[in-house]
Image (cartoon, rainbow, N blue to C red):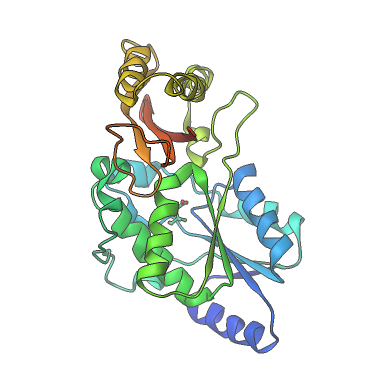
Amino acid sequence: MKVFKRKNAVAKEIKALKAANKTIGLVPTMGALHEGHLSLVENGLANNDVVFISIFVNPTQFNNKSDLTKYPRTLQKDIDLLSDASNNIYVFAPSVEDVYDKNVNAIKFDFDGLENEMEGEFREGHFDGVGTIVKQLLEIVQPDNAYFGEKDFQQLQIIRKLVDKFHIPVNIVGCKIHREPSGLAMSSRNMRLSPDHMLAAPFIYKTLLSAKKKFGTKSANKVTEWVKKQFNGHKFLKLEYFKIADVKTLREVKRKSNKKKYRAFIAVYADEVRLIDNIALN
Ligand code: PAF
């Protein structure tokens, strides 16, 4: 396993790998790696000669300063975890200066409106920050395949749009959500949950499963109202949004059509930890 701290060094390595006709996978992360990340890495290793894992807590995608400060940073632990996995792993863990130089700002993107829904509505500028870092990573690493988890389904669709709009030659692979045995979607943020909130949080997925069942016979509106009621007065969880949306446009569904695919999306505060999840409905 090799660890790179500077993008120039990565660019040099990529040149050598390309010259040797090696296929390259990329797994972009913000570290605090868990089994969900490792499954992306495994997928990458199964389908590429080498896999780059970027570990970088990207400041421009945080609209909330305290969220950025408190985001878990466990670089040495992450490196140890990856070094057990394979020799064909290359870690890229740059500094903010290396990535942004002196201009720690996001590019303004137009993702045809995908950026304004859900996470975009509640986290202003979030997808400009994500787009800025992912575009840069794709340009440096030039991967054949890049892997993203479906837990951030909106992000995944936006990255597909980014690649399309900028004609970036990479195959974007969406990977299934990994869950704790309790059903809670795996997330680096879970390690910040108090014991009470950890016990309460599986309620999010339980509610999504019930919503999916109800969506078979009820309107999107009715299901949404039902979900809101479940969180009313909840002792440990505060619902930020629940939306049933078209998977392509990410716009909230008004009237169901059996020609379209829908997903339910949810964001919940467990004290000050913000958790998101989603589920395919049809
Ligand atoms: O999903 C994440 O962890 C981040 O948004 C990503 C894609 C690594 C960009 O910083």
Image quarter for ligand 1 equals bottom left
Compared across the picture, whether 222 is left or right of 30 comes to left
Residue 164 or residue 51, whichever sits in front: 164
The answer, for residue 60, to whether it is visible in the render is no
Residue 211, horizontal then vertical, whole percent = 44, 22
Residue 69 or residue 129, whichever sits in front: 129
Residue 62, horizontal then vertical, whole percent = 32, 49
Residue 92, horizontal then vertical, whole percent = 55, 67
Residue 160, horizontal then vertical, whole percent = 43, 60
The answer, for residue 267, to whether it is visible in the render is yes
Residue visible at 53% across and 34% down in the picture: 191
Residue visible at 43% across and 44% down in the picture: 71
Q: Residue furthest bottom?
A: 19
Quarter of the image for residue 181 reads: top right
Using the image, determine if residue 124 lies above or below residue 206: below
Residue 108 or residue 98, whichever sits in front: 108
Residue 219 or residue 71, whichever sits in front: 219
Residue visible at 73% across and 68% down in the picture: 88
Quarter of the image for residue 123 reads: top left
Q: Quadrant of the N terminus?
A: bottom right
Q: How many marks?
A: 0
Compared across the picture, whether 80 is left or right of 55 comes to right
Using the image, determine if residue 95 lies above or below residue 268: below
